[in-house]
Amino acid sequence: MVILQVNYTYSGISRADWEKRYTDEVATKFLSVDGLAWKVWLDAPDEPRVGGIYLFESMAQAQAYLDGPIVARLKSNPAIENLETRLFNVRERMSAITNAPVPGLTLAAAAE
């Protein structure tokens, strides 16, 4: 399992107008991303900083997402600045012990 962390700031647009972008239709598009188990949407309360935490089944699928059209749109959007992406392998045993919401970890921990 692989975690992708994406963070960026936005400018030239009010928080109220930015909020209008968060629709059920936008969220639903992520259901068809190959290998994506889930996404947590992030929103800083006191600054124009947003992002997401994604769980992918494999590094290849996470990299394909980074190389794909969704991230390309972020990179080309003039309102988006300071785009940062980071990939992390999940430490499965430790994450299972601490009840991480990662599919299959409970079974993996019990089997060891």
Image (cartoon, rainbow, N blue to C red):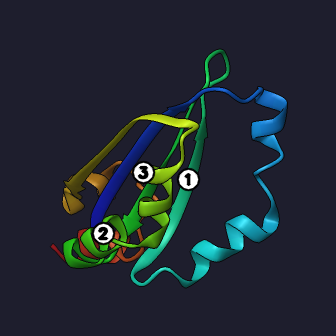
Label number found at residue 67: 2
Amino acid type, label 3: Lys
Residue 64 figure quarter: bottom left
- Crowdedness of circle 3 by 10 Å Cα count: few (<14), some, many (20+)? some
Alpha carbon distance from label 1 to label 3: 20 Å
Earlier in the chain: of badge 1 and badge 3, it is 1
> Is disc 1 placed on a helix, strand or loop?
strand
Above or below, comparing residue 61 to residue 7 in the picture? below
> Is disc 3 placed on a helix, strand or loop?
helix
Amino acid type, label 1: Val
- Crowdedness of circle 1 by 10 Å Cα count: few (<14), some, many (20+)? few
Residue furthest top in the image: 46
The x, y position of residue 11, in whole percent, is 61, 26
Q: Quadrant of the C terminus?
A: bottom left
Residue 106 figure quarter: bottom left
Q: Which residue is mark 3?
A: 75
Nearer the camera: disc 2 or disc 3: 3
